Amino acid sequence: MSSENFGIVVHGGAGVLSGLSKEQQKIIEEKVSETVISAYKMLEQGGSSIDIVEYAVSEFEDSPLFNAGRGSVYNANEIQEMDASIMHGKNRSAGAVASVKKIKNPIKLARKISEYTEHVLLIGDGAESFAQSIGETIVDPSYFYSEKNLLRLRKQKKLTSHDNIIQDKIGTVGAVALDKMGNISAGTSTGGMTNKMPGRVGDSPLIGAGTWAQNDVCGVSSTGHGEFFIKYQVAKEVCTRIEYLGQSLNEASSKVIGELYDIGASGGLIAIDKSGNVAMPFNTQGMIRGSLTNKSKLNIAIY
Ligand code: ASP
């Protein structure tokens, strides 16, 4: 089925984000804007949603501005363990990686898992040996070194309260696209949460929690306190409400994010439906986000 509508929506994480100077905000907004515009042009030229999602997420992974790839945060042992997933809504093909330490672009490896293996999720050493066997780019963990994130970890270790842990969270990334063929794809990538236990896996690499794409319904990428997003299967939940309750994208996604707020779960999501409508609700002070579709203007915002 082809669609006359198409578009892209991205996020760079939800959180308090109060430590961002005006200058930092501008740099982030510029990166988001450039990525959204390039992704939109690819869609306009007939590009496929899965390629565009991989492109947008890997652009953010290559930037130290976000908590994914190069900007990943540290776990309690001062190690960066990354998670990512990607899904194509046409046939529900999906791939994911968790706890990888040497993969330059976890989102690219996630896609290759979906295309070259019979599995959905590979973790740690197994994921890295697979990457090596197919020539995926492997880097020394020092490539991801971030002084800022190490300081963030050390500061956080001195805090005990749950609130502080949530508040200091930064920028997981995600993208969702609808292409002219009517295919919806979604992807998410993250370093997880600062000071997480070694081996902890969040929602980002879990299909249904961090990422979901279903043609004829919608695609979603989540960001927030992963444990809640897993337990409430947030990404799939939004699509399920549209499919079975007949809610609009806006209604379904805002309600889910509102319900999370009511139980003390912070975060947000981005979504696009089969008609090219976009939603970007969050229950935190801010969420780095951007969208552009054939029927709506470029929208880039943090707060
Ligand atoms: N959801 C991510 C995780 O729990 C973190 C985030 O989105 O900021 O790993």
Image: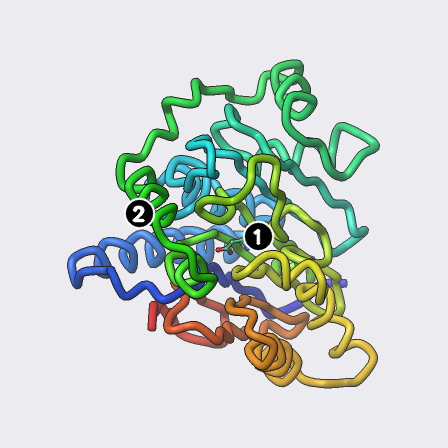
Q: Residues within 10 Å of mark 1 (few under 14, many from 20)?
A: few
**Closer to us: 25 or 35:** 25
Residue 46 disc label: 1
Q: Residues within 10 Å of mark 2 (few under 14, many from 20)?
A: few
x and y percentages locating residue 110 in the rendered image: 64, 37
Judging from the image, the colouring scheme is: rainbow
- Report the amino acid beneath label 1: Gly
Residue at (23%, 54%) from the top-left corner?
A: 27
For label 2, the residue is: 155
Q: Quadrant of the C terminus?
A: bottom left
Mark yes or no: residue 289 visible: no
- Report the amino acid beneath label 2: Lys
Marks 2 and 1, how far apart in space? 47 Å
Number of marks in the rendered image: 2
**Closer to us: 269 or 219:** 269
**Closer to us: 3 or 144:** 144
- Element type where label 2 sits in the image: helix
x and y percentages locating residue 113 in the rendered image: 71, 32
Q: Is residue 193 above or below residue 112?
A: below
Q: Earlier in the sequence, mark 2 or mark 1?
A: 1
- Quarter occupied by residue 3: bottom right
x and y percentages locating residue 48 in the rendered image: 61, 49
